[in-house]
Image: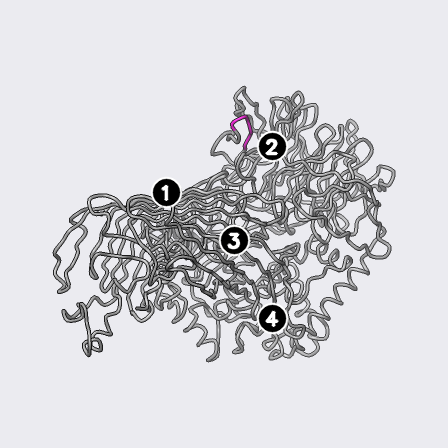
Amino acid sequence: MQRLSGFLLSATLLFLVADRLQALPLADPELNYRTYRTEHFAIHFPEGYLDNARRLGKVAEDRYRSMEPRFYSGIGVTNLILIPNTDTVNAFASTYGPPRVALYLQSPNPGEFAHFGVWQTEVFTHEYTHILTMYPYSGLINLAIRILGGLPPNNLTPVGLVEGFPVYEESQRGNGRLNDPRTNMVLRTAALEGEFPALEEMLAGTHRWPRGQVHYLYGGRFVQFLRQNPEYLATGAAQKLDQYFLLEEPALLPSERLQKLGYPELEEIYAAFREYESERARSEQLLETPFQRITHSGFSKEFLQLNGDRLYFFGASKAGSGIYSITAHSADVRMPANPPQEPIAKPDGAPSANDLSGSTYMQKHSLSYFRNPSASGGFTVLSKNDSVEILSSEDGYSHNASGFRYQLYGSNTLGLYSISEGERIVFPSRRGNSIAYIKREDPYRYLILAELDAEGQIVNERTMLRTDLYGILSNSSMSNDGRWVIALFRPGLTGAPGLVRCSTGTLRCENLIPAGLENLSIAQPSFVGEDLLFSSDRTGRFELYRLRLKGESRSVEQLTTTNTGLFYPVAVSSDLYALRYFADGYDVVRLSGESLIHKDATDDFLSARSGDRNEADFSLPLESATVSDYDGVLEVRPYFAGLLFSITQAESGIVAFDPMERHTFSAGIGFLEDTPYFSTAYQYNRFAHSFNAYYVRSSLKKRQFYCDAPSGPIIFLCQDDDYQFEYGGLSISREMPGRQFDQEYAVGLSHEKHRNSDSLAAYVFPARDINLSSVYAGYGFSNATYYPESISPERGFSFYGEGAFYPEDWVVIFDDRGKGTENAEFYTLNAQLDFFLPSFFDNHVPYLGAIGRWSGGKDPEIYRVRLSSYMRGQDPNYSSYGRGALTLTAEYRFPLLWLSRRIVSWWPSLDLRYISFAPFFDYGQSFDRQIYRDTWVRSYGAYADFGLNVFYLPVAFRIIYARGEGFAGETSFAFALVAGSSSQNHSMAQNNPLARALFHQANGMTDRSPVSF
């Protein structure tokens, strides 16, 4: 008998109730949301933010009037959601379901992002462009894609163009990334150092630095090239580019679409674009201040600071992140976990880093015994006796909504501890027991001076400065003698921040450099004696400057000339250390005091007038506002999710949800092998705990009595006895991401009906027909981590355990004539434990795992599972089964290569991204009462993951070989597609405990972590 795959059944159930949208509430559940409507927008905002909603509504209507006639989207109402109380600097737009834009209100720090006036206007323009370009479509081919795939057809557009058009639009009012010196820095450096991305990397993505920003920076400049190149303007193609997303050609064929508008073939365009950028970079090359490259690890680094004779910074690489330190004046420092990088070829005329002998490794400073932070809000280092004490603002502060919050942490013998738990503290700077920092309490920002008590907690807070959500207050730093605190400060809506200095004695503040200076910004100030160092883009590149303070006299001098950018200056004697940008990221460099240029720049900083910035674009509208309680339910529209791969990976149907995803509903039909079924699911996600309900049912027609043991010709009358089922469930669940651990739990009710169950490969029941209902509870936690090039969770562990109780009245066993004759009572326990061990090699993961199940109680033999459900290489037709099962697994997972390049020279849309490999060994047995030494069975094999870009879209698949031993052992080969570039990892989405356990085992626990921007 061909048995129904246990993996297929459990995976179908998993995806049925999978959380396809937000796992957490979109916004803080403590906020009471209201709705303000304009003609074309429904703006959902928390109480206290009405003025913000009205200002943004005015901007939104202005963008609608200027952009809708160009893109012809045809959208009636777009939902706009304001999300405060988070340190996430991001936004997203979606046309899947109700068109909506969600804006996290936290703005970037100066020097971290493009020039911006009011952050919300630029980020809204970017996201609204997504709405206008992703929503429309035309032509029979795109209609077929919409019906079959369920997604808006323009979602198949290569991501370089998806992001390139919005970056271009955000930059049309003087700000945005195309007007940012750092965008020029990235492209110029790549051109000069021979690291300009290939066409496929720009359109589809790359693992190389700057990774996810390639879509935005190169994509934006590419769209600018398409619109402004004189050749394309002369042919009229550039004037037609707004029609790109309305063309009938499929979006995954960008070259054909561009040629339809009158452009040349795509590779020809990109070659011209690359040559244009290369020539531009060569023409802008300067004679650079000589430097000595101290580190060679690249990727990101920030918050460079000096303590004693060591330089500290926060850094991230492809295989780790955290706080590192090096000895000042040290030579050729490399990340300890990374292989040495090839030296970067310098262009003619550019200075080269000194060729130093010897190698000094970075020291890593971790506040936690478990996992390191992935983002930093700044840190401060204090020497105490023969050790250092670090206070660090780090991500991972768990709260009950999407996004993250920075929390200030310290470390003691017990590991990590919170300082002022629950408060968002960034840019800490400590001298003795005095500490200065920025506190974020939306909608305000405060510059605080406080003390640390004997327990390391903050006391005696005093406010030195305050600004609202539209202003800027950042980069606080305290002088070595503790007399002064400096910060970057902008009290108004627009303009660059200025530099202020506040006395710790009087708490009075003075402007050292005024805010709102025209055509320049300042960033990352630090003390050098009584003077100040900072970075500024005054020349169009971020150079280093010194503000000299002598009594009432002040002057500013430029210290460097660079072809890239210099950030976070630190003085050591007469020399300067800073972070310099290279083609592979940021690294520490030393600039000799004898090489500094000392060029006067006083007039530009101290005598220049503030720019005449127009704040009318974000002014309050004159008309009165009509506000109601949150009415996002009125925007719920049934959305056809497609005939293929829609609600689940096996169903077709509809979905519906409100803009804030508080209510989510789905309904559809599908096939489990030859069995059709109907499904529906609902989730209420308003609070930290989500409520989940689902129901799945196939036909439950009764079997004829003569089909119990058919023989002879009767067999032909019983061939339609396919497996039939009914599943239902109610649960309350919660996910709790945290700094050191992620936790999840669920409690609920589960209901199952099985008919003709002897065709199942996973379950073994005492009768063909059985009804089961239970109450269950589960809990899980994990501290495993993903890095940019991880092929698996790394450096941690995860555990999930679940118990279910089946009361006697809830279990009914039927006889062959469909009569309920027996009841039973039992319980089940399921658990899985995974260890992702560290390795000497980047992104290599030795993995050890165990998965087990036990059934007990009065009638434990009712619900048994075959060992093949937990082990690879076992034939389910012959696999042993019992009340319990235990499988131990060992794997070694490692990447074979990362490439991000085309496979065939003439086919740029077919790219190989990565290949990974993992040999495995399983060791398990099923049992009834006890585990026997001689009944263990073994299986072994390997699997390989291949990540591709097909038509510039990510696709991944896995090839599996398994060889089992014992009576049920078999040799098997399998091929599995992984949707997009990743599959799901630990999830509370499945509310059936057994199906969840089966899914995890069938998937081999080798899932790749989703990556989002």
Query: Image point 48% across, 73% down: which residue?
Result: 137
Q: Which quadrant is home to the N terminus?
A: bottom left
Amino acid type for the residue under numbered disc 4:
Ser
Residue 32 in sight from this viewpoint: no
Mark 3 or mark 4, which is nearer to you? Answer: 4
Mark 1 falls on what kind of element? Answer: strand
Q: Foreground: 907 or 600?
A: 907
Structural distance between the alpha carbons of marks 3 and 1? 31 Å
Tell which tag, 2 or 1, sits nearer the viewer.
1
Q: Nearer the viewer, residue 703 or 137?
A: 703
Cα gap from disc 4 to disc 2, whole angstroms: 47 Å
Amino acid type, callout 1: Tyr
Task: Work out whether residue 40 can be spotted.
Answer: yes
Which amino acid type corresponds to the residue marked 3 in the rendered image? Ala
Which tag, 1 or 4, sits closer to the chain's start?
A: 1
Q: Which residues are magenta?
A: 409-414
User: How far is disc 2 from disc 3 in space, using C-alphas?
Assistant: 26 Å
Helix, strand, or loop for circle 4? strand
Q: Position of residue 637 (x, y in %)?
A: 36, 64
Which residue position is annotated with label 2? 428
Q: Earlier in the sequence, mark 4 or mark 2?
A: 2
For label 3, the residue is: 91
- Image position, residue 475 (x, y; %): 64, 37
Q: Which residue is mark 4?
A: 909
Mark 1: give few (<14), some (14-19) or many (20+) Cα within 10 Å: some
Res 285 quadrant in image: bottom right
Q: Which label sits in the foreground, 3 or 1?
A: 1
